Amino acid sequence: MSHPVSSQPAFASLSPPVMRASTVVFDTFEDFVQRKQRQPDGFSYGVTGTPTARLLEQRVAALENARHCVIAPSGAAALMTTVMGFVRGGDHLLVSAACYGALKTFAEKWLARMGVEVELYRPDIGAEIAELIKPSTRLICMEAPGTVTMEMQDIPAITAVARQHGVLTMLDNTWASPLGLTCLDMGVDFSIQAATKFMGGHSDVLMGCISMNDHGHYEILRETQSILGQQVSPEDCFLVLRGLETLPLRVRAQSASTLQVARHLADHPVVARMMYPPLEGDPGHALWKRDYKTNGCLFSMILQPAPESAFHGFFDALQHFAIGASWGGVHSLAAYYPAALQANRAFPATDQPVVRLSIGLEDPALLIADLDQALAQYAKAAPQA
């Protein structure tokens, strides 16, 4: 019984084709036997992607000023895939205390039990990281600004030290996007993006990507993607490819609105502290001004002390901010991180609850008015000065 292979004549379209496949077929027996030699770029089985995935990887690599890119099913998957590709038992792993929580949990609860020495480091560190490097140090995991509390790291200083010691570096660069920071040009080995956020842009897809220049690293990560089964749906690739078409416009608009909203809140009497490097008074402002080209769309704030009921009043009063933990889409979001979560963190930035806001594409004046009335509700439950 014959099994016909689907094929179509050449067809040109502005919209990229969605090519689904689990099984890749081969013209000859010899092609099948030698199928592994098609990697890392070619196609041997659907787990490493179809032409739809390769097109997305090529476009992300171009944005990152990178030679190679590997996509994964989520931003978290991209982080874990990178670590799993290069870290083994007996290695020393340095992780910023302000990195994405799932990465820290993976390091402390999984890798540490597999013989990896995991060490969290101060998230606003620079060249002083040299004091933490050991002969067994394999990888430094960075994120700037840090998740939730927005600490800045001196990325060029860290990568310079790492290269002197033969240590690899990875950076979760989602906040800035490649439009705000091309971190591979600063010596970072792996630039990680949660394409779920800015790249997808519409809160309807999960994806991550890893960009790099070294071909050997690319081969390792393609194999790791295959071994761990980190395949990505071609439909999801299509959504991110479509999101990339408007990425510069969205980042520019959200960046401008975010700075406008943040500056308003910085002067609000109910706001005790802003956590947002583009603001002049932020501890990380000098590093942001030196290295970054955009303002991001995400910041955090600490409100004047008040009982838990005040936070209920604030969040329940919001009309134009949805309550949700993600960010980077066209709709504005608000999230809450309790005091205990902050106080129990290594190198805590605060022992107070944190409110995090993601600014979308709504009219910033509308968002400011919404925050003002929600903060008024908060103030009603706060102790009077």
Image: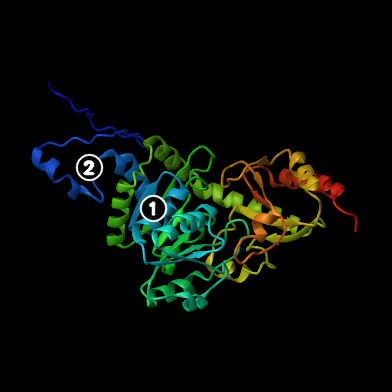
Compute the Cα span from label 2 to label 1.
Answer: 20 Å
* Quarter of the image where the C terminus is located: bottom right
Query: Looking at the image, is 167 positioned above or below residue 313?
Result: below
Question: Looking at this rendering, what residue extends furthest in the right direction?
Answer: 384
**Quarter of the rendering containing residue 161:** bottom left
Residue drawn at point x = 76 percent, y = 43 percent: 312
Q: Is residue 236 visible?
A: yes
* Quarter of the image where the N terminus is located: top left
Label 1: few (<14), some (14–19) or many (≥20) C-alpha neighbours in 10 Å: many
Residue drawn at point x = 44 percent, y = 60 percent: 112
Find disc 2 in the rendering and name its residue: 44
Residue 137: % across, % down: 40, 71
Total numbered badges shown on the rendered structure: 2
Query: Looking at the image, is 330 positioned above or below residue 124?
Result: above
Find disc 1 in the rendering and name its residue: 81
Nearer to the camera, 122 or 271 = 122
Q: Is residue 173 visible?
A: no
Label 2: few (<14), some (14–19) or many (≥20) C-alpha neighbours in 10 Å: many
Q: Amino acid at mark 2?
A: Ser
Disc 2, SS: loop
Left-right relation of 262 to 133: right
Q: Amino acid at mark 1?
A: Thr
CB within 8 Å, label 2 to label 1: no
Residue drawn at point x = 51 percent, y = 37 percent: 204
Left-right relation of 192 to 144: left
Q: Which comes sooner in the sequence, label 2 or label 1?
A: 2
Residue 263: % across, % down: 72, 58
Nearer to the camera, 135 or 68 = 135
